[in-house]
Image (tube, helix red, strand yellow):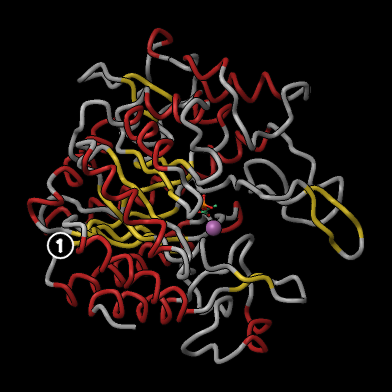
Amino acid sequence: MQQHGSFADLVHVGPWENMPAVQQPEWRDHPAYDEACRFLSSAPPLVTATETRQLREALANLVSTGALVLQLGDCAESFYECTPRHTSEKLKVIDSLGDRLAELTGRHVVRVGRMGGQFAKPRSAANEWYEAVRIPSFRGHMINSDIGTSETRKAHPRRMVWAYEASDLVQRVMRTYRQGDLDAGPPDGPWSSHEALVVDYESRLIRRDPDSSDLYLSSTHLPWLGERTRQPDGAHVAMLSSVANAVGCKIGPRANTDDVLAVCAALDPRREPGRLVLIARMGRDRIADALPPIVRAVANAGHPAIWLSDPMHGNTRRLPTGLKTRYLGDMTAEAVRFREILDAQGQPASGLHIEVAAQDVTECVGGPVADEDELQRHYTSLCDPRLNPWQAAALIEAWSSGTT
Ligand code: PEP
Ligand code: CO
């Protein structure tokens, strides 16, 4: 299954090398940096070019077939939850929520996991307080440890190698799972996706597709740009512009329409169906004002973008204890409003992008988690608060029926 490229096929330098990249670990002077980069440059691809083309085709046909996308998983994957058992549990949750969405809407659902490489997190603050000590923030297992000491929070480049190995484990189980479904027709996932944040890692996993000779990102099927790394003249946009995968981009409430148009032009210059996935993460109070002009401008510019709603990242609240949470009512309100806005603009609302745990966690308030006092019971997220499967089903039901 895995193809080894010849050295001539290894492509990791591009225009982004000399462009500003925000949110990067400072590890280039570390003695382990060069070795980690060499490892990645010659490693087999984690996903195949054929698979990335299959996902692009499924997305290209989305609008004409009336299909939907359901993208979900952890905020930050853990290195310690990449075993076949953990992966199978996550895949079952993705499929059962995908089945639920299909059943409620009567539409085909393309399933995408936030998994198989979601190991790096952008952070608003470089440092955080932990038991009265100021330490560097956790940036995902690809960069540092979740253990809260100054030493364990130092960025270590060898973590890129561990991230590759952990992704490989997950991708193999995902591939077997997809193939198990082949009797039912062409696979509709679950495909892998993650935020393409660490340029040192992602750029070294760019490979040449032996069939089309296009470049593709071999770390995941669907890489996306985060709200903090979508600068039109930045390294992240240039890096994803150079690859043929379907690519996503988060759009937050302060997004400037001209910047969004510049990013769309860079990522989708040929206006190709199935190339560009735009993920609105506005917040329930801001979506009504912020989203319509952007949807209109993108449509007028001729991009056949697939619009998804991430009703989570604009609705995070921090409790006095420092714990982060989200209210199911805020999320359903934003998701339903998203649909109404897309409908009013005559554009398809193509699905949801959500953070969901495979376990019965108590990280968001709503449904079985009656109030904030219950959050302590089972709060295990490494980063943002995730829905549990019950809460995710409730959100999907509200989105499908259009009522909160
Ligand atoms: C995320 O998806 O976990 C994330 C950090 O999102 P955003 O870039 O939209 O803030
Ligand atoms: Co998150």
Viewer-proximal residue among 161 and 143: 143
In the rendered view, does 401 fall on the left or right side of 107?
right
In the rendered view, does 182 fall on the left or right side of 214?
left
The relative height of residue 252 versus residue 236 in the rendered view (above or below) is below
Q: How many marks?
A: 1
Outermost residue, right direction? Answer: 132
Task: State the image coordinates of residue 294 (x, y, percent, origin top left).
Answer: 34, 48
The relative height of residue 95 versus residue 302 in the rendered view (above or below) is below
Q: Residue drawn at (49%, 69%), measured in percent from left and top?
A: 357
Q: Residue drawn at (92%, 63%), measured in percent from left and top?
A: 132
Task: State the image coordinates of residue 48 (x, y, percent, origin top left).
Answer: 31, 33
Viewer-proximal residue among 294 and 41: 294
The relative height of residue 348 versus residue 327 in the rendered view (above or below) is above
Q: Looking at numbered disc 1 in the image, what kind of residue is underneath it?
A: His
Q: Residue drawn at (28%, 42%), measured in percent from left and top?
A: 298
Q: Which quadrant does the N terminus fall into?
A: top left
Outermost residue, top direction? Answer: 8
For residue 238, which quarter of the picture? top left
Residue under numbered circle 1: 108
Viewer-proximal residue among 291 and 54: 291
Q: Residue drawn at (84%, 61%), measured in percent from left and top?
A: 130
Q: Which quadrant does the C terminus fall into?
A: bottom left
Task: State the image coordinates of residue 144 (x, y, percent, origin top left).
Answer: 71, 44
